[in-house]
Image: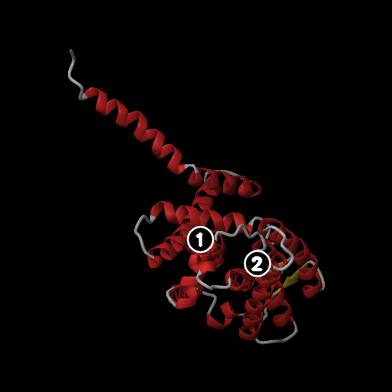
Amino acid sequence: MLWSALIGTIEQGLVYGVMALGVYITFRILDFPDLTVDGSFPLGAAVVARCIANGGSPFIGTALAFAAGIVAGLTTGLVNTKLKISGLLAGILTMTALYSVNLRVMGRANIPLLRKPTLVSWFGNQGLAPWVLFLVVLLLTKFLLDLFLKTEIGFALRATGDNEQMIRSCGVDTDSMKLLGLGLSNGLAALSGALVAQYQGFADVGMGLGTVVAGLASVIIGQALVRFNGLGWATSGVILGSVIYRLAIFVALRMGLAPTDLKLITAVLVVLALSTPTWKSLWEKVWGGESRASRIPAA
């Protein structure tokens, strides 16, 4: 029983890792505070669930979910770049609008996928089959993302987040780079939502609540654990952070905390991860100062 629950937790960490990679693009590479993920994640679930419920192929539904996420991200980008609305507010506006869009897509608040053909059932939903499926999808996504970010366009995208004024002076259209990054980020979030819906057997309009915080927690935890330089190490850290984040929630629930405390657990994990440099600096200041003082000879 414990082993199967642990395997299920790792599966969740892998499938949510795709979303975490999307959050990494906006928050770390593009330096854009995008909250659209809370709407694009359930959008992917809604699109694939509606497609499968209407007798469509889960492969086509998953591809459509990815495309829908890209459109959601582009919407946020256009509101920010063309209407000159701040990135944070643009994401909030798009996320709010997507709640109604998701209801329109599904036609109701919840679509069950039990006894429907999904990617998980097609691949085999017994034993370690879902684990292998999500691992393959996640590693393929990481490989393609690493490859893309090392191209000329990828370097321009990274430079836009590092120093927008400098890269604009070099002739790069930073608005286009923002649109590209936001579209790709929310496309990955919607892809993750589509996989989660097929994994848990239903799509719900409220399943995206707190998704961006969970993704940010995965990014922060991963970067705190993986200190190696390089793009490949950074994306690997995000994946590791996603798994560890889900394992931390699993441990908290096993210790007796109620499932209703999940949001509180998430907030605490994010605060602890964000405050790690502060505690480390304080630790070095206190203990480092004491060690230096102890080496000063007495008069």
Q: Nearer the viewer, residue 230 or 261?
A: 230
Q: Nearer the viewer, residue 268 or 166?
A: 166
Does residue 68 appear left or right of residue 29 in this picture?
A: right
Q: Residues within 10 Å of mark 2 (few under 14, many from 20)?
A: many
Numbered mark located on residue 41 in the image: 2
Q: Amino acid at mark 1?
A: Asn
The tally of labels here is: 2
Which corner quadrant of the image does residue 215 belong to?
bottom right
Q: Helix, strand, or loop for circle 1?
A: loop
- How are the colours assigned in the image? secondary structure
Give the mark, 1 or 2, whose residue is nearer the N terminus: 2
Distance CA(mark 1)–CA(mark 2): 29 Å
Residue 116 seen from this side: yes
Q: Of tags 1 and 2, which is closer to the observer?
A: 1
Residue 240, image x, y percentages:
43, 60
Residue 8, image x, y percentages:
52, 63
Does residue 74 appear left or right of residue 96 in this picture?
A: left
Asked if labels 2 and 1 touch by Cβ distance under 8 angstroms, the answer is no
Q: Helix, strand, or loop for circle 2?
A: helix
Numbered mark located on residue 117 in the image: none
Q: Residue at x 49, y 67 (%)?
A: 158
Q: Residue at x 54, y 73 (%)?
A: 172
Q: Residues within 10 Å of mark 1 (few under 14, many from 20)?
A: few
Numbered mark located on residue 163 in the image: 1
Outermost residue toward the top in this view: 299
Position above or below: 34 against 120: above
Q: Amino acid at mark 2?
A: Phe
Residue 27, image x, y percentages:
55, 59
Does residue 46 appear left or right of residue 271 in this picture?
A: right
Residue 246 seen from this side: no
Q: Residue at x 42, y 60 (%)?
A: 237
Q: Residue at x 65, y 55 (%)?
A: 210
